[in-house]
Image (tube, rainbow, N blue to C red):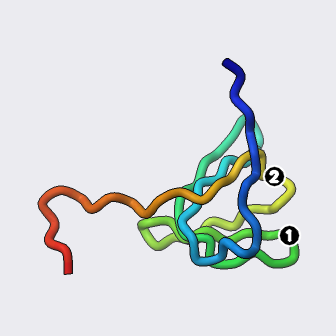
Amino acid sequence: MVARLVIAITTQDIGARITTRRRVPGGFRDAVGILVSWADGVLEVRKKDGTVVTIPEESLVAARVVPAAPPRPGRMQQ
């Protein structure tokens, strides 16, 4: 089986939860979070810890929309 890397997000996905894989020196790095902006060739993804990752569009090798994170066990829903 051969894995295919696909970029399946657009600017229309701002506000959605996404996963990304991008090239960095020495390999790849992943980020999962909410796509908060995509302008001038730069994506910003807010991770669950609140930090914002800036991703140059040309470094993306794969990206897609993913479902909301499941609730953590033992936490009450409000």
Q: Amino acid at mark 2?
A: Ser
Q: Secondary structure at mark 2?
A: helix
Relative image position of residue 32 (x, y in whole percent): 54, 57
Question: Which quadrant of the figure contains the N terminus?
Answer: top right
Q: Left or right: where does residue 76 sit relative to residue 70?
A: left
Instruction: Identify the residue at image location x=79%, y=70%.
Output: 42
**Front residue (pair 77, 32):** 77
At label 1, the amino acid type is: Gly
Q: In the drawing, does residue 32 fall left or right of residue 27?
A: left
Which residue sits at x=65%, y=76%? 14
Q: State the mark number for residue 59.
A: 2
Q: Is residue 50 above or below residue 63?
A: below
Residue highlighted by disc 1: 41
77 sits left or right of 55 in the view? left
Are there few (<14), some (14-19), or many (20+) residues within 10 Å of tag 2? few
Q: Position of residue 55 (x, y in %)?
A: 73, 62
Q: Residue 34, located in which quarter of the rendered image?
A: bottom right
Q: Nearer the viewer, residue 34 or 22?
A: 34
Image quadrant assignment for residue 16:
bottom right
Q: Residue 60: x percent and y percent?
A: 77, 52
